[in-house]
Amino acid sequence: MAIPHADVAPQLPAWLFDPAGQWMRWWVQPLLDAQRMQWDALVQWQQSLATLNKDVWEQWTVRFFGGIPIDG
């Protein structure tokens, strides 16, 4: 299972939007949260492909080299 990366899009610092007011933070933070969710989905998808690749490689190795799977 993939571990969500909370550090990809960190929370906005308060001092960054203080001149623009609190409403600016309320508008920008959901956009960063959406981007974080998209990044987490991409990472999970890539990890599932890596697991599939490992499984196919081990099956191929066992079939054509007649040995034990690589990870024992």
Image (cartoon, rainbow, N blue to C red):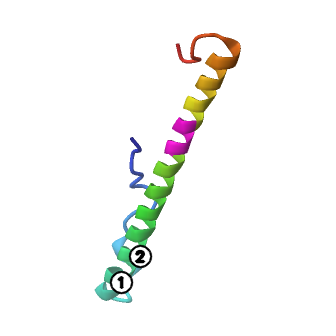
Which one is in front, 40 or 52?
52
Q: Main secondary structure of the magenta part?
A: helix
Q: Position of residue 53 (x, y in %)?
A: 59, 36
* In this rendering, position of residue 67 left or right of residue 45: right
Residue shown at the point (49%, 43%) measured from the top left:
48
- Image height check: is 6 above or below 49? below
Residue 68 lies in what quarter of the image?
top right
Which residue sits at x=40%, y=70%?
34
Q: Residues within 10 Å of mark 2 (few under 14, many from 20)?
A: few
Could you tell me the amino acid type at mark 2? Leu
- The answer to whether residue 12 shows anywhere in this view is no
Residue situated furthest right in the rendering:
64
Q: State the residue at coordinates (50%, 56%).
A: 42
Pointer 1 residue: 27
The image quarter containing residue 27 is bottom left
> As rendered, which of 40 and 56 lies closer to the eye?
56
Residue farthest along the front direction in this orientation: 63
Give the labeled residue for mark 2. 31
Q: Which residues are magenta?
A: 47-52
Question: In the picture provided, is 21 more to the left or to the right than 2?
Answer: left
3, above or below 35, in the image: above
The answer to whether mark 1 and mark 2 are in CB contact below 8 A is yes
Residue at 34% across / 80% down in the picture? 25
Judge whether residue 38 can be spotted in this image.
yes
Q: Nearer the viewer, residue 64 or 6?
A: 64
Residue 38, horizontal then vertical, whole percent: 46, 63
In the rendered image, the vertical position of residue 31 relative to residue 64, given as above or below: below
Return the x and y of residue 1 as percentages of the image width and height.
39, 41
- Mark 1–mark 2 distance (CA, rounded to whole Å): 7 Å
- State whether residue 6 is above or below residue 14: above
